[in-house]
Image (tube, grey):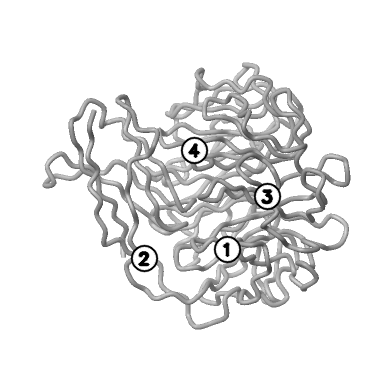
Amino acid sequence: MALAPLLLFGIAEWLAPSTLASPGSLDLTFDPGSGVTDGTVYSIAVQWDGKFLFGGFFSSVNGNHRSGIARLETNSRVDESFSVSELGGHLHPVLALPDGKILIGGEFDRVNAVSRIDVARLNWDGSVDTTFNAGTGPAGNAQAHVDALALLSEGKVIVTGDFSLFNQESRAGVVRLLPSGRLDPTFDAGQGVLGHLPALALDRDGRIVIGGNFTNAQGEVRYGITRLNSDGSRDPTFQPSPGAQRGTARGSVNALAAQPDGKLIIGGDFTHVNGVPCNRIARLNSDGSLDASFFIGSGVEGTLGASVDALALQNDGKILLGGSFAMINGSPRGGLARLNRDGSLDTTFAPGSGVNDRIKVMKALPQGQVLLAGSFTKVNDTLRGRIARLQGDHRPSKPSPVRLTPDSGTSADQFRLRITGNVGGSYTVETSGDLRVWRTVTNFVSADPETVLLDSGATGLSQRFYRVLTPF
């Protein structure tokens, strides 16, 4: 099969540029009123149309009843067209899907009076999508639950969490689900990973990186970090020795970010990595060794319980981190900071006094703004109920091109397209056989600088053209 992808440009970022305020300062144009007035927000997802989904353990958003999940308009007001009237538990991950549907995970037994165990798919309006059913879901202990979700290009989903059974089959900590919600029998993680697994990322080669609170992964000693091949097998090329530690004991990795060059940023509650002092933040090489070129001095410091719980990569390679801490390499930073690519503190990003409680999730937006959520009620001494947006670097509002290339995994049976663009950018991928009639393959919001998509419809074709669009 010889397919010729067409490289087209004229792609524009669509979010309005930041006003002339300091990077890291509170964006006063994003004001969700009283916000989330109870509990904690654990996850944020940006939908194709720019609306924001967030999930967690709460019951009210700006005076509106919302059970664990809500959607905000681009103007930060509650979207009245989306509602989950009942959630029998709470959410951890929320994932916006290309077709507008929403995947949720956590610890719950029903959604809108429909039986769903810890994982479910919602329609655009918040109703349960009955075509997705994971059966009895996670089990094996009294508090079995889903911690994280990652979407694969073919519509399958990686699920991690604290479980030893999934839909009554032996599965330890990680599974792959088909688009129907059923277990994918071609994915086998063997002995798996047992523990709390909140950090999940896909690297540039499609391998699965898992972070959490564990000492063993697939029969190997691994402290808080491991990597699987795309089929679930152990990746023997990834050898942390032993990984994240508190002294010589096990540490925990609470957040992950996969860089385009194959390196991994890890954050959490640890004091050493592979026996080397690294206070709560580090970068690993692709083989799991510590990257000595990433130097943060005394690291992330704070009172008892200090940790990094959220990481996000910007398009320029800078690293956003949030959590519960007071200092970065001796400089005051109240739970919120940005690092340069070498690990040094970015002093141009000035969040003032920071947050008054823990940040659990951060998202970098295309124009540089930063969404953050957690259990805080103030940002730089201004009231913000558990969700806020910060100003980014000042950028001109002009078209920003993306690049389309065939991925190295392309074969006679499948065509894989690599899209290099902007973190948080909204894209539509279209195909044509004659450059006249175009059809949409998928819509998506890019979580990483590079995204790989599988076009199963290209099998057997001698040629097919591709273009990518984004709204202004």
Q: Nearer the viewer, mark 2 or mark 3?
A: 3
The x and y percentages for residue 375 are 71, 59
Residue located beneath label 2 in the image = 14
Q: Identify which amino acid the numbered label 3 is placed on.
A: Ile
**Which label's residue is closer to the chain start, 4 or 2?**
2
For the residues labelled 3 and 4, the Cα–Cα distance comes to 18 Å
Q: CA distance from mark 2 to mark 3?
A: 30 Å
Earlier sequence position, callout 4 versus callout 1: 4
Q: Earlier in the sequence, mark 2 or mark 3?
A: 2
Query: Residue at point 72% right, 38% down?
Result: 240
The first of marks 1 and 2 along the sequence is 2
- Which residue: 60% across, 75% down? 26
Label drawn at residue 205 = 4
- Looking at numbered disc 1 in the image, what kind of residue is underneath it? Lys
Residue 37 placement (x, y as % from top left): 67, 61
Kindly identify which residue carries mark 3.
266
Q: Nearer the viewer, residue 36 or 239?
A: 239
Looking at the picture, tell me which residue is in the foreground, 237 or 357: 237
